[in-house]
Amino acid sequence: MNVDRTCLLCRLKMNPRQIFQQHLAPTSFAPIGIHITRAEGATLWDAEGKEYIDLIGGISVANMGHRHPKVVAAIREQSEAYLHVMVYGEVLQSPQLHYAEMLAKQLPPGLDCVYFTNSGAEAVEGAIKLARRLSGRPNILAAHKSYHGSTTGALALLGDEYWRQAFRPLMPGILHHEYNTQAFLNAIDRHTAAVIIETVQAEAGVREPTQEWMTALREKCNDTGTLLILDEIQCGFGRTGKLWGFQHFGIVPDVVLLGKALGGGLPLGAFISSQKNMAALAENPVLGHISTFGGNPLCCAAGKAAFEALLEENGTLAVSKKEALFHQYLQHPSIKNVRSKGLLIAMELENDQEVLATLHRALKLGVFSDWFLFAPNCIRIAPPLNISETEIQKACQVLKECLG
Ligand code: PLP
C-alpha cells in the first residue's frame, strides 16, 4: 500500500506549530517541539523528512523499537475483533488473560496476579491503596529523588520538594529518606504500610543501590511486616540487562509496578502481587480499585506482542554489550562521567546549561535525547534495546561533536 507519509496538517496548509502552542496545554515553555510524522525501530522522522536517531525510545517505552512489526500486526488483529467493551475486571478479554498469564510466568512465584491500569502513575496509586488496605497502617516510605508519577498520590511520593510544593496539601503519611542509606532502613517500622522505591533510580540520573542495602531492605520489610513495592516502570522489560531490575539483587518484592514498555507503545500500567494480596481489593469495600480503561484490550494485545518479541528476539542479551559500547564511545574531556545500568545511561556534563546546549545541537544534527528531572547536569540515554551498533556509534559521535 502506498501511504502518503507527509503530514496531513501541512497538506491542509495548516500551521502545526501554531496549533501546538494555542490548543495543546503546555508542560513547559521549552518543549522539544519537533513535529514527528513517523517512527520505526530507533529512528524518528519529522515533517520535513529529517531523520533522528532516537536515544530515548519515548522514555523507556519502545524497548523493542518503534512500531515493531509484531506489535503493529497484533494491534491490527485486535482492532478487527473488539476495542473497549467493559470496565476492568468484569468480563473475560483474551488479550488481558494471555498477557497476565505470560507476565506471571516470567515473574517469580508470589507475583502472579495482575491488575492492569492505564498508566504507571495509576499502578502506583493502586499499590498505595493495596498496601494501606492490607496492613491498616498509615505510612509509606519513599526515597529522595524518586519519581513515581504525576497524579496527586504519586506526587506525594516524589522525592523532590520543588515539584511537590505548589500542590499542597498532599496525601499524608508519606516519609522520605535518602535512597541506599541506613537512615532509610531505620525509618521502617511497624507503622510503615509499604516501602516504595525504583529498583534503579532513573530520574536521579541512574543510581543503583548496593547489594547489601537491597538485602537489608528486604529483611527489614520482612521483620516489620512492611510491603516492599518495587517500581520497575522505567527499569523493567530488559532495560537494565536483566528482564527485571530486581533480578540483579536476588530479592523479590511483594508488589511490582510495571508501565512504559509494558504496553509496547500503547498506554498500559500494572501492579502485580500475590492472589491473596490482590483479593483484598475485592472486598470491604468491594471495587477497591476500579478503572474504565485499565487493561484496554488493544493495549494488552500490543504489550503482549512487544513482550513476546523481547523474549523471542532475546532483547536483553545484547544490552550489556551495547552498554559497553556507549562507555567506549562516550570518551571526551567534557564528559565527566557515564553512569549506567544496562541501557539506562546518564552522561554527566559540567552543568545543566551544557546539557541543554548539547541536546539542542544534537537535535539539529539528528540525535534525539533528553535530560533527567533530578540530574539536570546529565543527558538521558535510554534507546530501544535493539538499537544497532552502527546507530550507537553514530549517535555517540554526534553527541561528542556537540559538546561545548
Ligand atoms: N514510575 C517511574 C519510575 C517512572 O519513570 C514513571 C514515568 O516516567 C512513572 C512511574 C509514571 O508513569 P506514567 O507516566 O505512565 O504515569
Image (spheres, rainbow, N blue to C red):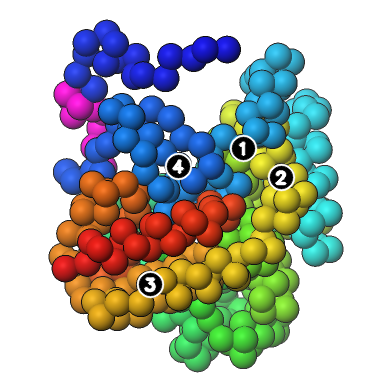
Q: Give the residue type that dot 4 points to.
A: Thr
Residue on which the image places disc 2? 309
- Asked if the residue under mark 2 is in contact with the one under mark 1, i.e. CB atoms within 8 Å, the reply is yes
Residue on which the image places disc 3? 330
**Comes first in the chain, label 3 or label 4:** 4
- Asked if the residue under mark 2 is in contact with the one under mark 4, i.e. CB atoms within 8 Å, the reply is no
Q: Give me the residue at 61% from left, 37% from top.
A: 68
- Asked if the residue under mark 4 is in contact with the one under mark 1, i.e. CB atoms within 8 Å, the reply is no
**Comes first in the chain, label 2 or label 3:** 2
Q: Give me the residue at 46% from left, 59% from top.
A: 392
Q: Give me the residue at 31% from left, 27% from top.
A: 47
- From the image, give the main secondary structure of the stretch colored magenta: helix
Q: Position of residue 87 (x, y in %)?
A: 65, 26
Q: Give the residue type that dot 3 points to.
A: Leu
**Residue count near mark 2 (Cα–Cα under 10 Å), binned few <14, some 14–19, many ≥20:** some
Relative vertical location of residue 207 with respect to residue 40 in this rendering, above or below? below
Q: Position of residue 236 (x, y in %)?
A: 61, 59
Q: Quick one: SS at disc 4?
A: strand
The C terminus lies in which quarter of the figure?
bottom left
Q: Nearer the viewer, residue 279 or 346?
A: 346
Bounds of the magenta segment: 17-27
Residue on which the image places disc 1? 68
**Comes first in the chain, label 1 or label 2:** 1
**Residue count near mark 4 (Cα–Cα under 10 Å), binned few <14, some 14–19, many ≥20:** many
Q: Which mark is residue 43?
A: 4
Q: Give the residue type that dot 2 points to.
A: Ala
